[in-house]
Image (tube, rainbow, N blue to C red):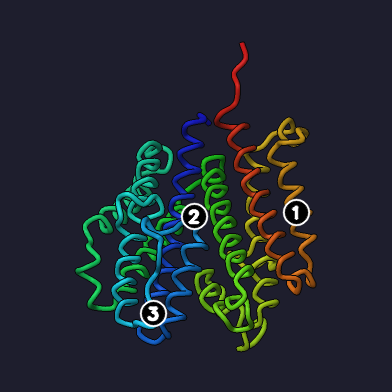
Amino acid sequence: MLARVADSLYWMTRYLERTEFSARLVEGQLQRLPVGTAEQVAAGWRLLFAGIGSEPLDSEALGDLEDDDFLFVDGYTLTDILTFEPGHPAAMVNCLAAARENGREVRSTIGASLWSCLNREYLKLRQTRLVDVWGREPEHLYRDIAQGIHRFHGTCDASMRRGEAWCFMQIGRYLERAQLVGSMLAAHCIDAKAREDGGEWPVVLRACNAFEAYGRGFGGVVKTDNVVALLVHDPRLPYSLRFCLDRLRASEDVVGSPAASRSRDGTAAVLERLQGRLDGLGEGASRDWPMTWRELTAIRQHFRDFHRALDRRYVSYSVTA
């Protein structure tokens, strides 16, 4: 496979994953605007931006905690920034535009049905204005964005051969997911109020499509240790770090090579170190919260190392005569 094709497939699904994750976070935040206290709403915005590794263009303040009306106006502004702001790289319309551009580069690889699905979602969002939907349950817009990306992945799974192209798409998808989930967990673990039992954890569980899974496994009481254990270690939960690691390893086995495995900095070697780090974040680690935050930060660094190793191996490699 050509390096530019692999790179476009990889980044297309990374941008789509970021768009979907942001959409679910914003949907959850909008649902709490009418019912949450001013303090809860403001804390939710701070943790949301920290979780996606971004911040508003003007991040001096997120509102007066004593002024509910101001927080609603501020919520509109922050929602608009996260969705439509041209100058904000994490805005959903910009991420979808980047995914679409990468998809356009590989139309012959992904096929007409996938390209049509991707193009349709981008055009639909570009033609939308927040002011047109704000007065009538704006969270529906973000539910539609997430469902549109689900349709793309469903079409992909139903139509693509499980070869190198599909594996590079899977690597981009699950690497981005692992980074976002790890960032969200780290942001909550370092915030004393957010990491309390109950706290902000239900928002995290819903953003990770894990609220029902948590209820079936642990009951209705949201405990911090259980949330961290679920989202880090559960190999059957699609949004757990362990699940993402397993998908990266399975895809790397298809596109990798023995030479890459032998190299100390090769993709397979980085995944082995990541496996050891996840194993080290055991059942009792979450009781020491500074340590848990540092461990999650280290895990995210290993995922970044995998990205760099992947780029060196398949995209930015040196050519010798």
Question: Is label 3 in contact with label 2 (beta carbons under 8 Å)?
Answer: no
Question: Is label 1 in contact with label 2 (beta carbons under 8 Å)?
Answer: no
Q: Nearer the viewer, mark 1 or mark 2?
A: 1
Q: Position of residue 96 (x, y in %)?
A: 36, 51
Q: Position of residue 181 (x, y in %)?
A: 57, 62
Q: Nearer the viewer, mark 1 or mark 3?
A: 3
Residue that label 2 marks:
157
Q: Quadrant of the C terminus?
A: top right
Q: Which element type, helix, strand or loop, lies under badge 3? A: helix
Amino acid residing under circle 3: Gln
Q: Is 62 positioned to the left or the right of 80 in the image?
A: right
Up-down relation of residue 232 to residue 256 (above or below): below
Q: Which element type, helix, strand or loop, lies under badge 1? A: helix
Q: Is 198 positioned to the left or the right of 118 in the image?
A: right
| Distance from the alpha carbon under mark 1 to that under mark 2 | 27 Å
Residue that label 1 marks:
275
